[in-house]
């Protein structure tokens, strides 16, 4: 017996019903607090950016934005939590370049960063900076390299986790300078900075935000910026490229994502509101204070950034032979 097809009018009506329901949800959204997951402990750049954005977003949406820290495994635990959350726009991730690196560093992840999450907008780019404690005699990259080569045992550098940008920057720095560096991973920038000031680790390549107050206070010394151009927050600190590492250009971007199945209208609404916030004078002033460069791009542009960096860092991870279980 041949199946009886649905009349076109019925199919059209169903499609219209789904469309109208989606639009109604977007118009009503949000009707309760939104949670923004930070995959690092409090105090680091990801946390600072999330709280700055969350405060403004809450005002814009008319609902509280709760910033919740879920650190661990190089930011992948927080990402996995959001991937598995209900895709309704009420659980978001403050993601970062670290997640594009983790795709290649970890042999097996419980999610696909580019498929299981929907980009909303890239919030900001924050340059990384090579810093040492005030007790270290190095005053520039050249003198630091000399110290590192003479050190025994290995010269240590800290990062805010295995598979993060700081980790990979360290491997590239080591390879290009011919130094033997021992990587010490931390759970976040807070404990890393404390140990760096105390001399438990010799150097780090953290983002500018958590180290800037200590650089200004004289507790840490900034020797080089890792991006192609100098940072407006540290205009007198030369880039690593200027100091001989030609072509060295590695920074850390941060952006917001939602579970992949989140309604497109909700993603569009969030993107529009966030882009307005990021373009506002108050937010840009706050970003300048912490050494961040505001971006505010579209979901499609952020998706392209993720694709480009995933491919770029896959090559660097392979050359550095960095793998984690």
Image: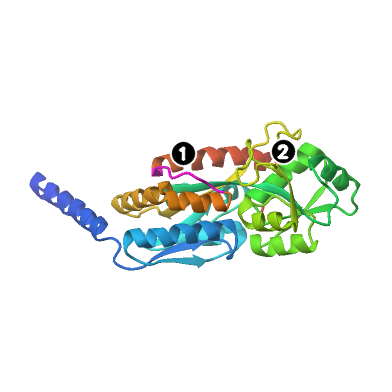
In which quarter of the view is residue 318 placed?
top right
Front residue of 107/17: it is: 17
Q: Is residue 188 visible to us here? A: no
Q: Secondary structure at mark 1?
A: helix
Whether residue 65 sits left or right of residue 305 in the image: it is: left
Q: Is residue 254 visible to us here? A: yes
Where is 306 relative to 133, above or below?
A: above
Whether residue 144 sits left or right of residue 25 in the image: it is: right
In which quarter of the view is residue 173 placed?
top right
Q: How is the image coloured?
A: rainbow
Q: CA distance from mark 2 to mark 1?
A: 27 Å
Q: Magenta part mainly helix, strand or loop?
A: loop
Residue under the point 29% across and 66% down: 31
Looking at the rendered image, the disc whose residue lies closer to the viewer, 2 or 1, is 2
Badge 1 crowding class, 10 Å Cα cut-off, few under 14, some 14 to 19, many 20 or more, is: some
204 inside magenta stretch: no
Q: At which x and y percent is residue 214?
A: 69, 58
Residue under the point 38% across and 67% down: 64
Q: Which residue position is annotated with label 2?
A: 240
Front residue of 82/209: it is: 209
The magenta region covers 292-299
Q: Which residue position is annotated with label 1?
A: 304
Quadrant into which the C terminus falls = bottom right
Whether residue 65 sits left or right of residue 210 in the image: it is: left
Q: At which x and y percent is residue 209?
A: 61, 54
- The numbered dot on residue 116 is none
Residue under the point 61% across and 60% down: 73
Q: Secondary structure at mark 2?
A: loop
Badge 2 crowding class, 10 Å Cα cut-off, few under 14, some 14 to 19, many 20 or more, is: many
């Amino acid at each position: 017996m041949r199946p009886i097809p649905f009349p076109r009018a019925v199919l059209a009506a169903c499609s219209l019903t789904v469309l109208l329901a989606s639009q109604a949800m977007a118009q009503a959204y949000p009707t309760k607090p939104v949670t923004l997951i930070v995959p690092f402990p409090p105090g680091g750049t990801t946390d600072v950016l999330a709280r700055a954005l969350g405060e403004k977003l809450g005002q814009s949406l008319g609902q509280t934005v709760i910033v919740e820290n879920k650190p661990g495994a190089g930011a992948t635990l927080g990402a996995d939590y959001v991937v598995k959350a209900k895709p309704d726009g009420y659980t978001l991730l403050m993601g970062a370049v670290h997640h594009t690196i983790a795709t290649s560093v970890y042999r097996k992840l419980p999610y696909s960063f580019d498929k299981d999450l929907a980009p909303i907008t890239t919030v900001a780019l924050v340059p990384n900076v090579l810093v040492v404690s005030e007790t270290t005699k190095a005053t520039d990259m050249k003198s630091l390299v000399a110290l590192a080569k003479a050190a025994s045992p290995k010269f240590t550098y800290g990062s805010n986790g295995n598979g993060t940008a700081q980790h990979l920057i360290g491997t590239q720095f080591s390879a290009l300078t011919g130094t033997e560096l021992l990587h010490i991973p931390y759970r976040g920038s807070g404990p890393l900075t404390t140990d760096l000031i105390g001399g438990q680790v010799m150097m780090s390549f953290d983002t500018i935000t958590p180290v800037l107050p200590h650089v200004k206070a004289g507790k840490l010394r900034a020797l080089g910026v890792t991006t192609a151009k100098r940072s407006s927050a540290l205009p007198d600190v030369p880039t690593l490229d200027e100091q001989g590492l030609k072509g060295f250009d590695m920074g850390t971007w941060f952006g917001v994502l939602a579970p992949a199945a989140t309604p497109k209208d909700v993603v569009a609404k969030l993107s529009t509101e966030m882009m307005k916030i990021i373009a506002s004078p108050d937010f840009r002033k706050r970003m300048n204070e912490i050494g961040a460069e505001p971006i505010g791009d579209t979901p499609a542009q952020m998706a392209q950034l993720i694709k480009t960096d995933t491919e770029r860092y896959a090559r660097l991870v392979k050359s550095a032979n960095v793998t984690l279980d």
